[in-house]
């Protein structure tokens, strides 16, 4: 089954994980507005690296907000995944045709994908049946030039409006700051962080640890997201959320007794 | 490459997402102690449904704790993934041979897998190169009989000690409360939640929303984790963390221009 967004009265839901006040979500909403009506429903606070967290122990609150004359929306006291779920189930009268998440301030390529709240919002859109795209800029700075990421978002939006997207697939877009050189299909690079923590001692002489670390790419290939980005180009990785290790499952199923 | 834990001086790291005071982590540590030396490093508070979150905006604190004469460990002011990363990078003098996570109070089968802190701790173990297992009980109650889940953990531990586990693979074990009927290899069932929120009004007449919802299985098959569990049996799903949609990637790569 392919989800193909309809052309008239197109409605695009925009979410992120950096919160409603981040420049990235405005940049993405501007691109979305070229293609249809935009609803922004996003976390009321910074939610970086929350992964696919959802809120189960606290209730969610929703607040209307206005960024400027053109951009307004609803802020949710939860995670990116909460926002998309709540938008679908309760907040939007007209269901969206497309879900966009980002533009994240920081890369979501390679292993970063697993920790990403930005990607989880788009994945949640896919789970709910909407063609969904996550967009991230490899630069952390909130003053980075997002024009190339906007152009990448524009091309990928155009792509899914023309071609649809198979159900179960999310597109994970990453691009450097500055103008877009090129944009190509990629795979998630096998990678991991090394030297992940820095230990310090506080003024009361008690130890604490900060997350830090260096990203290490563990395989080679011109079609890997991290390698394409290293060359200053943009990447689009199709991802899915069935985590079953199918090759291993087929090999092992029934053959080895777990009794 | 297959990771085969060594047999002498075996060291098992035990983590969870319900926090160090949950009965489930004690039940799992007891099983682990049958196979080697145990280190418990787990969140100091309840971290259910945090997914693969990591802590980037706050430093992490570590506190020693003792549950009883036999069980002691370190409590971390972070997520399950933080715990395993910090254990590997800073806290453990002797690296672990196996990482265990659980026993979670609540199912991590089907789509729950994505939201699970328990599974993310085991996945983090796999990323760091250790054979890793997540174990969950389908019953939420903290007074549930975990003997069957313990038996499932025991069998799967024995399995990976004898056979090793290919690198990149995590085993996601789920079992009902009570004695274990049987345990079989399964796949993650395609599924999603419907009717996900309940709207209420607080004493000040302001609206809020609770996460709730019903889990819907979207495919059929005797080898799906959710279906095996429905029959009161235990399931073991091999999972992996390369999210690339490879079939779609092979079909589309180079064929459709993103210019």
Image (cartoon, coloured by chain):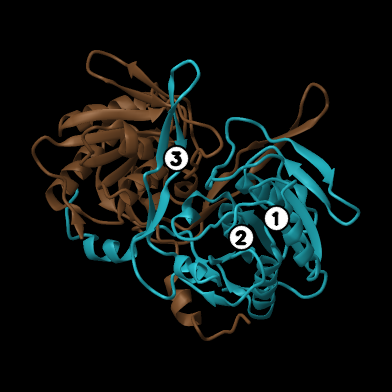
Chain colours: A cyan, B brown
SS under mark 1: helix
Does residue B20 appear in this view? yes
Q: Position of residue B2 (x, y in %)?
A: 19, 57
Question: On the rendered image, what quadrant is the N terminus of chain A found in?
Answer: bottom right
Question: Residue at 32% across / 45% down in the picture?
Answer: B125
Viewer-proximal residue among B57 and A15: B57
Could you tell whether B251 is left or right of B87 in the image? right
Q: Residue furthest top?
A: B69
Q: Position of residue A91 (x, y in %)?
A: 76, 48
**Mark 2–mark 1 contact, CB under 8 Å?**
yes
Q: Residue furthest right?
A: A69
Say which mark, if any, is on residue B117: 3
Question: Residue at 34% across / 33% down in the picture?
Answer: B177
Q: Residue furthest bottom?
A: B255
Discs 3 and 2 share one subunit: no
Q: Position of residue B82 (x, y in %)?
A: 42, 37
Mark in front: 3 vs 1: 1
Residue identified by numbered label 2: A137
SS under mark 2: strand
Say which mark, if any, is on residue A24: 1
């Amino acid at each position: 089954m392919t989800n193909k967004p309809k052309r008239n009265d197109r409605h695009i839901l925009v979410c992120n994980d950096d919160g409603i006040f981040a420049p990235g979500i405005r940049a993405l909403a501007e691109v979305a507005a070229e293609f249809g009506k935009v609803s922004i429903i996003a976390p009321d606070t910074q939610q970086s690296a929350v992964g696919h967290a959802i809120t189960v122990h606290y209730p969610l609150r929703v607040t209307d907000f206005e960024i400027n004359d053109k951009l307004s929306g609803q802020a949710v006291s939860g995670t990116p995944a909460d926002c998309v779920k709540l938008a679908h189930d309760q907040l939007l009268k007209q269901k969206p045709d497309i879900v966009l998440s980002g533009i994240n301030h920081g890369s979501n390529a390679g292993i970063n994908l697993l920790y990403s709240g930005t990607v989880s919002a788009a994945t949640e859109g896919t789970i709910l049946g909407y063609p969904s795209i996550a967009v991230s800029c490899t630069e952390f700075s909130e003053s980075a030039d997002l024009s190339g990421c906007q152009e990448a978002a524009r091309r990928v939006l155009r792509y899914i409006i023309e071609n649809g997207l198979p159900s179960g697939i999310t597109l994970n877009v990453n691009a450097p700051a500055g103008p877009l050189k090129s944009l190509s299909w990629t795979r998630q690079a096998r990678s991991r962080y090394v030297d992940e923590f820095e230990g310090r001692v506080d003024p009361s002489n008690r130890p604490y640890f900060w997350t830090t670390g260096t990203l290490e790419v563990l395989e080679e290939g011109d079609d890997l997201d991290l390698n394409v980005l290293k060359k200053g180009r943009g990447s689009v990785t199709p991802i899915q959320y069935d985590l079953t290790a199918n090759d291993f499952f087929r090999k092992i199923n029934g053959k080895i007794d777990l009794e």
